[in-house]
Image (cartoon, grey):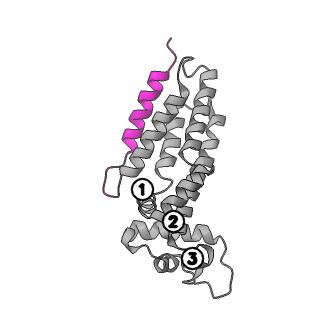
Amino acid sequence: MSPRGIATPDVRERLFAAAERVLESSGPVALTSRAITGEAGCAKGLLHAHFAGLDEFLAELVLDRFARTARQAEALPGRAGEGTVTENLVAVSQSLLTSTAPVITGLALTRADAAVRIREALAAGAPGFTALQDSIAAYLEAERRLGRIADGADVSALALALVGTVHHLRMTTWADAPAPTDQVESLVALLVGAAAPRS
């Protein structure tokens, strides 16, 4: 445990990772400031030294994980022409599915203050599902220029269909539910098949 008055390196990520472990092992009812700092192995007051409270902490955790996934998706257009379109879209979809456990997002959205903070941040331009959709559409457009997606394909609609479905799966898949991997792979295969150039 960090002694009082000693700086804790990477405190935000350390607390975020600890919260994810508490939720995974004990569920939402166990998520308290004390449980998070105890899991992180740091002083009990550390969370409140960096966040106004648990609602702000949860909102920042969700926004941080959204931003991390959006950064990964930003690289997707640069992979146009590499591997297969299906492989690339499945990979970005899987990163979104695993970016934040659905229980975290669900918990944050059931707490009014956290939900408001998330909505306000997204409305102000924080990376979220719109950024992911834009990156996927840009990737599909790059693949269209390379001839791997049909000229007439509506890449924006394809990106919306993929991101919307993955978002739905994230919010409705819980710890005891089957992994949505097969559903995502089936959807991607369907979308890519519909958008493939006709020989």
Q: Earlier in the sequence, mark 1 or mark 3?
A: 3
> In the image, is residue 195 above or below residue 61?
above
Residue 83 percent location from the top left of the image: 57, 32
Q: Residue at x 61, y 69 (%)?
A: 12
As drawn, which residue projects farthest toward the top?
A: 199
Q: Which element type, helix, strand or loop, lies under badge 2? A: helix
Mark 1: amino acid: Pro
What residue did someone put label 1 on?
102
Q: Which element type, helix, strand or loop, lies under badge 1? A: helix
Mark 3: amino acid: Leu
What residue did someone put label 3 on?
47
What residue did someone put label 2 on?
58
| Quadrant in the picture for residue 152 | top right
Q: Is residue 91 left or right of residue 174?
A: right
> In the image, is residue 139 above or below residue 169?
above
Mark-to-mark CA distance, 2 and 3: 11 Å
Q: Earlier in the sequence, mark 2 or mark 1?
A: 2
Residue 52 percent location from the top left of the image: 58, 73
Magenta extent: 174-199
Mark-to-mark CA distance, 2 and 1: 13 Å
